[in-house]
Amino acid sequence: MKAVVLMKTIYMPWIRAIVVVVFGFCLATYTNNLTPVPVAKYSTEFIGRWQGTVGNQKETMSINSDGTFVCQIHPMGFIANTLSQRVTGTISGTWKISGAMITLILTGEKNERLENSNASSTIVSFKKNELVLKSDNGENSTFQRVQILWPTK
């Protein structure tokens, strides 16, 4: 019985310290993801891989530090997921950010029909791992960061 009490006495401070450190790390990470990105950092924080839904299409955007992007568009819904060939469309081009406005200049396409050669969206909300864009037609789309892409030299 004394051995159990002795072990509790010896290890309890360490267990408490570990729990406090882990809790603090989790809280700091969670809080960092909630903090809005300042407008001045939009063009550097935008770089990475993002995934979201626009209308009835799932999009994965790879935004590169050299000002280029590649966007893969996947059909969604019952018919697209069960009966179709799930053809993925790809759009590529260049991007630029001015204030809260993102402009995509489309230069390439595969399995997609483009009506315009450029598109603009307004950044409604931008946090480290979440991006909400409002299109020219007033539709909001939310994207989650999938991966950060580091600049290449």
Image: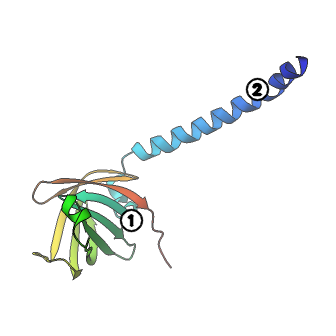
| Amino acid type, label 1 | Arg
Residue 110: where, in percent of width, then height? 23, 81
**Lateral position of residue 75 relative to residue 128, left or right:** left
* Residue 142 shows in the view: yes
Farthest front residue in view: 83
Residue occupying image coordinates x 39% and y 60%? 45
Q: Secondary structure at mark 1?
A: strand
**Lateral position of residue 140 relative to residue 126, left or right:** left
Write down the quadrant of residue 73 in the picture: bottom left
According to the image, label 1 marks what residue?
49
The answer to whether 60 is drawn above or below residue 112 in the figure is above
According to the image, label 2 marks what residue?
12
Residue 138: where, in percent of width, then height? 11, 54
Foreground residue among 54 and 134: 54
Residue occupying image coordinates x 25% and y 57%? 53
Residue occupying image coordinates x 33% and y 75%? 67
Farthest top residue in view: 1
The answer to whether 118 is drawn above or below residue 135 in the figure is below
| Amino acid type, label 2 | Met
Residue occupying image coordinates x 27% and y 73%? 88
* Residue 100 shows in the view: no
The answer to whether 44 is drawn above or below residue 38 in the figure is below
* Crowd class of label 2 (few under 14; some 14 to 19; many from 20; radius 10 Å): few
* Crowd class of label 1 (few under 14; some 14 to 19; many from 20; radius 10 Å): many
Q: Secondary structure at mark 2?
A: helix
The answer to whether 93 is drawn above or below residue 46 in the figure is below
Cα distance, mark 2 to mark 1?
A: 43 Å
Write down the quadrant of residue 24 in the picture: top right
Number of marks present in the image shown: 2
Residue 139: where, in percent of width, then height? 14, 54
